[in-house]
Amino acid sequence: MTETKTHYRACNVCEATCGLEIKYQGNKILSIKGDKKDPLSKGHICPKGVALQDVYYDKERLKQPQKKTKEGWQTISWKQAFDEVTDNIKRIQKQHGKDAVATYSGNPGVHNMGAMLFMPLFSRTLKSKNRYSATSVDQLADQLAAQLLYGHQLLVPVPDLDRTDCVLIIGANPVVSNGSMMTAPKVAQRLKDIQKRGGQVINVDPRFTETSKLADQHIYINPAADVYLLLAMLNEVFKNNRETLGHVKDFTHGLADIKELVKDYTPKSVAKITGIKAEVTQQLALDFCTAKTACCYTRFGASTQKFGTFTQWLGNIFNMVTGNFDKAGGVMFTKPAFDIIEPARKQKNRKTFGKYHSRLKGLPSFAGELPVSVLADEIMTQGEGQIKMLIINSGNPVLSTPNGNKMDKALASLDYMVSIDFYINESSRHANIILPPTSSLERDHYNVAFHTLAIQNTVKYSETLFAPSKEQRSDREIFVELWARMQPKGIKSQIKTWLTKRHINKKGERGIIDDGLKHGPYKNLGLEKVIQSKHGIDLGALQPCMPERLLNKDQQIHLLPEEIKADIARVKSVFKQNHQDSAYPMQLIGRRDPRTNNSWMHNSYRLIKGKARCLALINTADAEIHKLQNADEITVTSATATITIPVKITDDIKQGIISIPHGWGHTFADMKISTAQANAGVNINILMDENQIDEISGNAVLSGVPVRIEKV
Ligand SMILES: Nc1nc2c(c(=O)[nH]1)N[C@H]1C(S)=C(S)[C@@H](COP(=O)(O)OP(=O)(O)OC[C@H]3O[C@@H](n4cnc5c(=O)[nH]c(N)nc54)[C@H](O)[C@@H]3O)O[C@H]1N2
Ligand SMILES: Nc1nc2c(c(=O)[nH]1)N[C@H]1C(S)=C(S)[C@@H](COP(=O)(O)OP(=O)(O)OC[C@H]3O[C@@H](n4cnc5c(=O)[nH]c(N)nc54)[C@H](O)[C@@H]3O)O[C@H]1N2
Ligand code: SF4
Ligand SMILES: [Mo]
């Protein structure tokens, strides 16, 4: 009989990075459980971690390149695929210029070591300004606020969840999402522990969520009104002379500007727009200020709205002005073993915002990318600089970006499209060629991104569990090959040799990680030691690190950056108008489900079985107005489209608000994800208007979208 073995690794599906314990015999997985000895996740696991085996065994997962022909998809060799892809890049760039070839990088790319380390190598070689990613339907606002205040897009302060006395959660549902821009596995337990310590958990959300159930206090807020709540709380802080910058005072400027800015926004004056009584806002500010330590955590719902950047900026300011920045129990920066931030210090020009603008609409670039809201138009609008070819890596923009119908048409209209993905889904079905990478269990993994955003410093390396078959390629191999084929002949072999020797010898990406660890902030840490630890190594709690960690050139913090100043007038004008659109009297917000991950993993029967979950949540009072019963179908109409969806009636959502999950709508017959197709749901993103953006950053508006509903 084959021996039963145990493999330890970090799950790479979401930001929680849970340690997994996998028992297996040969190629057969016997069980996947949480690794109790993982220093960060301490045994936590969610259904998606268990379902990694379904992705591994999925017969519909692609392993060899596919070419679209008149007779359907054909399996072709890697050589032919790489030849055709790079021939087309060269042809199109020669004919239409560099910008005619665009890239879109989706969420799993950030959770993928090969893509993180090698996709930039390839995309830089294209020299195209048309680079897009899921960042601008997600955390662009968080990263821009970080860049403006601390000088780097990844210097995002992380709540010190394990030591705080009060956490104020605005626009996040970590009990379901497992945390975002805050790697905090086992988050429900961690929140309960705050309460056990005598602390408070407060949640501000238009819906009473799974996180609210756990909180000491839930506050219903109108969508996109967080900016006014935060301004009023700050007003209250100043009114009661409770402002304090703590030890960051000596290198922080502009407190008087903040005081001036918030003076018109009293808890009373914002009550109508926020939907929160003045006393509640006052008490909230007081609770936060009087807690020994506190942290305000603003996330997805706060970022993907018309004041995304302003709100994220205010979240930072609130922590700072109440003396909770760079302090144990407040918010702090990490000290990752493999540090992707520190190298930026050497760059002379650290300006990453607004270096250039999109051809249409003039949206600003950020960190070498443009906001994805403009992508469909950039594909479909003729003229110089039009996008003719798109290379998508691990993304599904038809389901994940605004105006999905338009995106679908845009992808169909391309001269050439490539998808690096192991499924034929809503977006990759438009590709001329699909290059499928290996899946999670078939490759090494180091979490390059999320150790940087974790509530505790730890380090972990995961080795390959099952060797891929000969015909498969990893994301790293795909990018290096594409990159190499784009190099001029002489240089090509020279650099490829260098790259091969230094980084991708037999041991793959290990060279880079080992290098990074050895030159990182921890002594005596190398890859070998980390691998030997199996479960990962605890590197200790977050520590104050100001001002040394700042990447601002002057090593100073300026509380009111120019970009924010320029948006104050808009905040003021919406405050004054505060009107509702009578054609669209309701507001749409999103929702995540514990058993799906954005638009993918829906092909796992284990995850998708059971009651339908793509449902519209509406309030009992709204149901009465529209004479609706549970499971009745409604149409939801926005400025861009109409969808039909069954309702679930609940008191756990504010009246006038409707909540629908994203990532569904597996309705196209020419895909190859049969379990997902059998549980199709609807694509909420056809309702999102790509013209509605956060005006500072260009991030898409996905929360608080005006809609109307009708009974079918
Ligand atoms: N309305 C609305 N829209 C949203 C959101 C919302 O809450 N509401 N959420 C937004 C957010 S936060 C995000 S991050 C985006 C996500 O949007 P995207 O990143 O565009 O889409 P995903 O659904 O994550 O698609 C992931 C794709 O990657 C493939 N994939 C999985 N693993 C790998 C891998 O290892 N390598 C490669 N090459 N491919 C892989 C999958 O098969 C799938 O096709 O959606 C955004 N859109
Ligand atoms: N199970 C599961 N986990 C996931 C994912 C998944 O698809 N499924 N996706 C992963 C990804 S890519 C990300 S980015 C993270 C996101 O993780 P989170 O940041 O926790 O985001 P959500 O779970 O979408 O929660 C956002 C909350 O904001 C609320 N909200 C909406 N509009 C507003 C508003 O205007 N103001 C306020 N205050 N609240 C508002 C919504 O009701 C919702 O409860 O989750 C990750 N984890
Ligand atoms: S919470 Fe995230 S990292 Fe943890 S098992 Fe689930 S999907 Fe994986
Ligand atoms: Mo995301």
Image: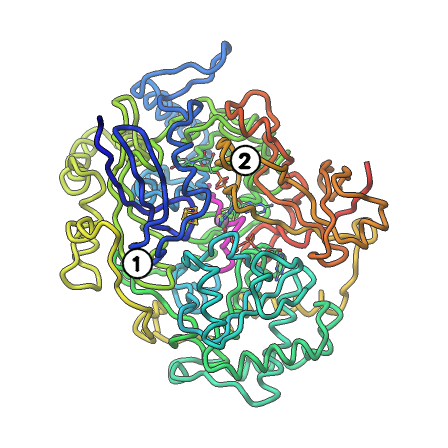
Residue 596 lies left or right of residue 55; in this view the side is right
Q: Please name the amino acid that badge 1 sits on.
A: Pro
Is 134 contained in the magenta span?
Answer: yes
Q: Say which of 700 and 273 sits in front.
A: 273
* Residue 655, image x, y percentages: 76, 57
Mark 2 C-beta to ligand 2 under 8 Å: no
Residue drawn 65% across the image and 76% down it: 281
- Tag 2–tag 1 contact (CB < 8 Å): no
Q: Secondary structure at mark 2?
A: helix
Image quarter in which the C terminus is found: top right
- Tell me if residue 129 can be seen: no
- Tell me if residue 536 can be seen: yes
Residue 658 lies left or right of residue 446; in this view the side is right
* Residue 291, image x, y percentages: 50, 81
Q: Say which of 209 and 319 sits in front.
A: 209
Task: Tell me the magenta residue range.
Answer: 129-142
Snapshot colouring = rainbow
| The quarter of the displayed image where residue 350 is located | bottom left
Up-down: is 86 above or below 252? Answer: above
Q: On residue 608, which mark appears?
A: 2
Q: Secondary structure at mark 1?
A: loop
Residue on which disc 1 sits: 39
Q: Say which of 218 and 699 sits in front.
A: 218
Residue drawn 29% across the image and 64% down it: 335
Q: Say which of 320 and 99 sits in front.
A: 320
* Residue 49, image x, y percentages: 41, 43
Residue drawn 60% across the image and 82% down it: 260
Disc 2 residue crowd, few under 14, some 14–19, many 20+, Cα 10 Å: some
